Image (cartoon, rainbow, N blue to C red):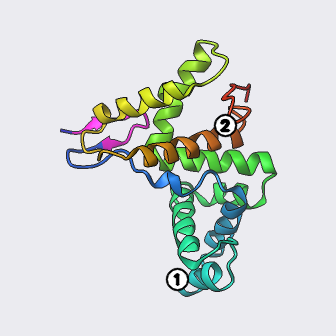
Amino acid sequence: NPSRNPNSEMITAGQMRYRADITAGSLKVAESRVIADLLLKQVDDAAWKSALEQENLLQTRSPATARRLGRLIRNRLETMTPDLWKLVRDGSATVATHACLAAAVKHSALLADFFELVVKEQYRMFSERLTNQLWDNFIDDCQSRDPELPQWSKLTINRLKSSVFQILQQAGYIDSTKSLQLQTV
């Protein structure tokens, strides 16, 4: 029995809505500029591997980290068109950040739903800040929206929260990950 999520994607029985892959990185704008450039150049698999592993264009500590981060960013950016990739690669810091945010929201139902169900509601209510309790309640509610969701460990939930709040801070929605003070964007 398919159901609709706020992003208008069809979710069918047996298909998991939420993934924890967002823990691999926040917006990673500098790294996204590199990946956008590679996508725009339409490099082949060998050049992709060389750029990430031998040339270490993402400046990671290991080839495994480069592969994981490259895969996450590529998957995010590939949800969008080459026009957005150009904004990521060539845009100002603000433009590139918001282009990366758009791709991250489109790629991650977890992030999209947090924006739609929590952040939007807090702005609507003129709340001054987000709270950790809002995150905890959101995660609890995710299980009802996604019966296929595995039971995430406390560590995974904390890493997800850290990534989501970092994204919110990088995009200017909150002033810091400590105070969680909402800002006008």
Residue closer to the observer: 5 or 119: 119
**Residue positioned most to the front:** 154
Question: In this rendering, which labeled residue sits more in front, label 1 or label 2?
Answer: 2
Counting other residues with Cα less than 10 Å from the Cα at mark 2, is it few (<14), some (14-19), or many (20 or more)?
some
Q: Quadrant of residue 184?
A: top right
Q: Quadrant of residue 59?
A: bottom right
Q: Is residue 94 above or below residue 174?
A: below
Q: For this view, does 101 lie left or right of residue 142? A: right
User: Which of the pair 42/147 is nearer the observer?
Assistant: 147
Disc number at residue 45? 1
Residue 160 in magenta? no
User: Residue 23 location, x and y as percent?
Assistant: 51, 53
* Label 1 neighbour load within 10 Å: few <14, some 14-19, many 20+: few
Which residue reaches farthest top? 125
Q: Earlier in the sequence, mark 1 or mark 2?
A: 1
Secondary structure of the residue carrying tag 2 is loop
Residue at coordinates 70% horizontally, 43% vertically from top-left? 170
C-alpha span from label 1 to label 2: 37 Å
Q: Is residue 137 left or right of residue 149?
A: right
Q: Which residue is mark 2?
A: 177
Q: Position of residue 126 (x, y in %)?
A: 64, 13
Majority secondary structure of magenta residues: loop
Taking the spot 52% from the left edge, 83% from the top edge, the residue there is 45
Q: Which residues are magenta?
A: 2-10
Residue extending furthest toward the right = 92
Disc number for residue 18: none
SS class, disc 1 = helix
Rendered location of residue 24, percent (x, y): 53, 58
Front-most of residues 176 and 38: 176
Residue at left 50%, top 25%? Answer: 134
